[in-house]
């Protein structure tokens, strides 16, 4: 009857049962992670077998499946991290609930004691209760703030990053010490353990990795730049160590870890591809790069075979040239007749050179040169008379069509150099090979050009 009037009481949430369920889920995720890692390792072994069998496409497919397994493993890691955060929040909420229950018990006890106290005691007690209540609100707000691994470590980094750099720089100033300072690792471990005791070894490990990373950045900034050959060796080592396939973006992220800046990774990889030390293939819209130690050995063996083949060809050609040289030496042995013939040849060459120089001196009187000059003069003479005839024809046309402008035309002719003595050229004083000039010839040529 009471349940019908007031309803059934809500079952209380058992925090311990919830934590147990989260632990079971965490164990399940860890088992699944191990299975996926095992499958990824099997795919790598298959890829190696296909590579030895020169089945490149099958090897790429195996590595693609391996990458999918690794992505699932990474996703499971994120799930585990979220479960850890949820467990921490539940433990904090449980502590808050117990604290509130205790405060309620205290408030009930104070109410029971009100009858035995006077008004001054009541006012004082109320002030204390208000103060405690305000403190509890602050505690609840602090406990209700979302807690995540990234936020925790960001807060830690912001508080001791300056001290970290000071410690590292102090250690670098010490002469003859290249190892990381032991006190730095110990102090960071104690610091993280005190602030985040629930993180345990994982939290300490992550902060130690952060310290090591920043220390390496400082050391690398003080080193000289790597040469091209050193960069090539660093990038090849990435391929040989992982025996995996990479995109260019992935290589640009991995290059700085080896001391190769991301801006130069593309040029270094392209030089390795040009030298056949790294293979490249486009699958879909992505371009993959890879280089396995076995592939490098095969490439070196093929280069060696090519060089040996070139050496054999060069040796064969050398032998042929030696035989030709021996054949040409036959009949050219030193003798008195040969010496006398060579002396005569030198005398003939000397005389030929003297005659050639003498001909150069009389080149202007060469009959062939004179005949060419006559031919050129005749062509120029005919061209001049042809243009003279054209001028006369144009002058006659202007007079016929513009009789009213005769004076202006005469003035224009005079300015252009066409005077009354303007006439055809005669070359009677120069002996020509052809017949003398006929004044009618230019007119005939003009008529032919117009036709």
Image (spheres, rainbow, N blue to C red):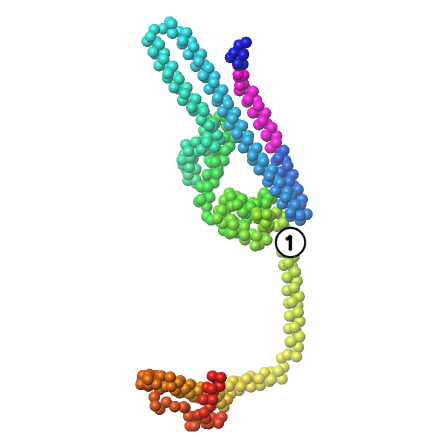
- Of residues 284 and 97, the one drawn nearer to the viewer in this rendering: 284
Q: Judging from the image, what secondary structure is the residue with disc 1 in?
A: helix
Query: Is residue 356 toward the left or the right of residue 39 in the image?
Result: left
Q: Is residue 256 visible?
A: yes
Residue corresponding to mark 1: 301
Q: Answer with left or right where residue 443 lies relative to residue 330.
A: left
Does the magenta portion include 31? yes
Name the magenta segment's main secondary structure: helix
Image position, residue 279 (x, y; %): 59, 50
The image position of residue 80, as x and y in percent, is 55, 30
Q: Residue furthest top?
A: 116
Residue 321 appears in which quarter of the rendering? Answer: bottom right
Res 376 visible: no
Position above or below: 120 against 299: above
Q: Residue at x 59, y 47 (%)?
A: 284
* Neighbours of disc 1 within 10 Å: few (<14), some (14-19), many (20+): few
Residue visible at 53% across and 10% down in the picture: 2
Residue drawn at (51%, 32%), measured in percent from left and top?
205
Is residue 234 placed above or below 97 in the rendered structure? below
Q: Give the side of residue 318 with respect to residue 88, left or right.
A: right
Q: Quadrant of the N terminus?
A: top right
Determine the residue positioned at 39% across, 19% down: 135
Q: Which residues are magenta?
A: 9-34
Q: Is residue 353 magenta?
A: no
């Amino acid at each position: 009857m009471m349940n019908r009037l007031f309803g059934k009481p809500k079952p209380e949430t058992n925090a311990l049962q919830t934590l147990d369920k989260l632990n079971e889920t965490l164990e399940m995720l860890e088992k699944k992670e191990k299975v996926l890692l095992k499958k990824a390792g099997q795919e790598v072994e298959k890829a190696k077998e296909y590579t030895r069998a020169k089945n490149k496409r099958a090897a790429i497919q195996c590595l693609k499946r391996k990458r999918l397994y690794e992505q699932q493993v990474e996703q499971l890691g994120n799930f585990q991290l979220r479960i850890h955060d949820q467990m921490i929040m539940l433990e904090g909420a449980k502590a808050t609930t117990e604290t509130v229950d205790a405060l309620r018990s205290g408030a009930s006890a104070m109410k029971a004691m009100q009858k035995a106290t006077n008004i001054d005691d009541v006012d004082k007690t109320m002030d204390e209760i208000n103060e405690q209540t305000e403190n509890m609100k602050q505690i609840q707000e602090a406990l209700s703030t979302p807690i995540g691994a990234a936020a925790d470590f960001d807060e830690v980094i912001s508080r001791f990053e300056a001290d970290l750099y000071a410690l590292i720089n102090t250690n670098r100033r010490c002469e003859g010490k290249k190892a990381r300072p032991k006190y730095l690792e110990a102090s960071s471990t104690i610091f993280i353990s005190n602030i985040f005791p629930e993180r345990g070894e994982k939290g300490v490990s992550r902060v130690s990795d952060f310290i090591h990373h920043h220390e390496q950045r400082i050391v690398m900034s003080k080193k000289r730049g790597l040469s091209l050959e050193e960069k090539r060796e660093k990038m090849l080592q990435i391929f040989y160590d992982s025996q995996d396939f990479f995109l260019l973006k992935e290589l640009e992220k991995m290059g700085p870890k080896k001391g190769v800046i991301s801006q130069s990774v593309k040029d270094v990889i392209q030089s390795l591809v040009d030298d056949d030390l790294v293979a490249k293939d486009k699958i879909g819209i992505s371009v993959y790069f890879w280089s396995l130690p076995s592939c490098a050995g095969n490439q070196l063996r093929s280069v060696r075979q090519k060089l040996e083949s070139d050496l054999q060809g060069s040796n064969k050609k050398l032998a042929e040239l030696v035989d030709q040289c021996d054949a040409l030496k036959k009949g050219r042995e030193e003798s008195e007749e040969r010496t006398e013939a060579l002396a005569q040849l030198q005398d003939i060459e000397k005389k030929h050179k003297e005659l050639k120089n003498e001909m150069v001196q009389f080149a202007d009187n060469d009959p062939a040169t004179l005949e060419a000059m006559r031919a050129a003069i005749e062509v120029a003479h005919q061209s001049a008379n042809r243009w003279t005839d054209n001028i006369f024809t144009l002058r006659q046309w202007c007079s016929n069509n513009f009789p009213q402008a005769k004076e202006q035309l005469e003035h224009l002719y005079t300015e252009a150099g066409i005077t009354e003595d303007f006439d055809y050229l005669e070359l009677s004083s120069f002996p020509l090979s052809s017949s003398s000039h006929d004044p009618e010839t230019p007119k005939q040529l003009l008529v032919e050009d117009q036709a």
